[in-house]
Each structure stands twice: as C-alpha cells, then as structure tokens.
Image (spheres, grey):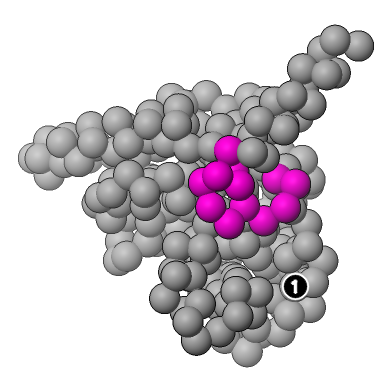
Amino acid sequence: MEQPKQEEGEYGYDLFPGRKTNNKGWLTQSLLTFNHKCQVMLHLATETSPYAKLLLSAMSSSGCKVLKDRHFSCEDCDGTVSGGFDANSSQIVLCQNNIHQQSHMNRVVTHELIHAFDHCRAHVDWFNNLKHLACSEIRAANLSGDCTFHAEVSRLNFGLKEHQQACVRGRAVRSILAVRKSSPEEAERIVDEVFDTCFNDHAPFGRIPHDKRDARFANRAYENRDRYHANL
Ligand SMILES: [Zn+2]
C-alpha cells in the first residue's frame, strides 16, 4: 500500500542521515574504528545479554529469524539518539557514535529488538497510527531495562513501582516526540490512552525483568518451553 507523502522529518529519518547518503569519503574512513567497535559490542550483546537472547529466540520461533548482517546496522546518528528501528527495511540502527559502553549497547539492542518483535508478531502501523507506536515504545521502555538502569537513584525518592511507571511513561513520550511531529500534549494523551494495556503486556518475557538475573530466568524458562514442545 502506498504511504501518504509526508515530510521526512515527521518519521525521524533526519536523525539517521547515514541511511540516505552513501558517501565513502575520509569521514567514513575515520569512522571505521567506531564501526568496528560497534560490531564487536553488538556481537557480545547478542551472545551474552539474556534479554537480547530471549528476544532473538522468541522472534525466531515466531518466524522472524534475525540475521546480524541483514537486520542490524551500525551507523552515525545525529544528536544523542542511541538507536532506532527502521520499519521499512526491518532494520535496527545502532548509533555507533553515541554508544560507547557494552551495558548501553545491551539496552539499545534489547529496546530495538522489542520494536522488531512487535513488528513481527503484530501488524504494527508505525506510520499512521500513533497508538501503535506509543504501545511499542511503552513496552520497549518497560521491558528493556531502560528504567531499571536509573532506578537505583530514584528508588530512594519513589517506590519502585511508581518509579517504573513514571519512567516508562516519560521515555515513551520522549521517544514519540523524537520521531514524529506531534505536540507534547498529544503524545502524552496517546501514551496515557494505551498505557495500562501496553504496560501490562510483557511478551515475550513472563514479567518485567528488573535485572539480569530476572532476564536470565525468563530466558531459561523460554528455552525450556521450546524444548518441551520439541519433545511432543
Ligand atoms: Zn523505541
């Protein structure tokens, strides 16, 4: 189906300038080291992060096998964006100029894999339905550990549950505003409309993984479920 013609900026493509141009100048050369480091960290994330591993096997059993070379792309991005999911090409963009630590890479890979998982399991209308986008952003913020990461500090001020909800809500609103031309009020309204349903949708994790140990348990349970089915 043909997409209605809209400004590029509305879809956030201006945040990923490297996707349009393919210049192989001196700049590209000097960024090879960044690119290599990004590839190495991506490899480690997919091999060692229990969050990423669970999502990869869930996608594989849903018929959406993720191939590292085809579905991930390390690129330079504008501003402070860490990553994105390009629904047109089903590709996860990792911002090699903004990700410098393995723990950050693990969170970005997990966050974007949740979008890819949603893209795989549901017919998400990323471009025309803000509720779909909002729902996936809520799930990605809730399940990727994005909010657990900062929890240690804010836990002193708020309860853990309140922190998680407030943090997820704020991140989802900011993510929408980063990729769509929408007013903060509209973004907040849409996030609130779908919040309860999407905040409580923990698939493919059994529940919100609050730390690596939770994710490891969830991953093991998930793998055993496959094994059980395989024995039938
Ligand atoms: Zn997102």
Residue drawn 56% across the image and 84% down it: 158
Q: Closest to the observer: 160 or 92?
A: 160
Quarter holding the C terminus is top right
Q: Is residue 154 visible?
A: yes
- Give the quadrant of residue 187: bottom right
Does residue 62 belong to the magenta stretch? no
Does residue 214 belong to the magenta stretch? yes
Q: Residue 164: where, in percent of width, then height?
A: 60, 72
Residue drawn 85% across the image and 10% down it: 231
Q: Residue 43: where, in percent of width, then height?
A: 38, 29
Mark 1: amino acid: Phe
Q: Residue 173: where, in percent of width, then height?
A: 58, 76
Q: Closest to the observer: 27 or 135?
A: 135
Point out the stretch of residues depicted in magenta: 205-216
In this picture, is 225 found above or below 150? Answer: above
Does residue 105 appear left or right of residue 26 in this picture?
A: right
Q: Which residue is mark 1?
A: 195
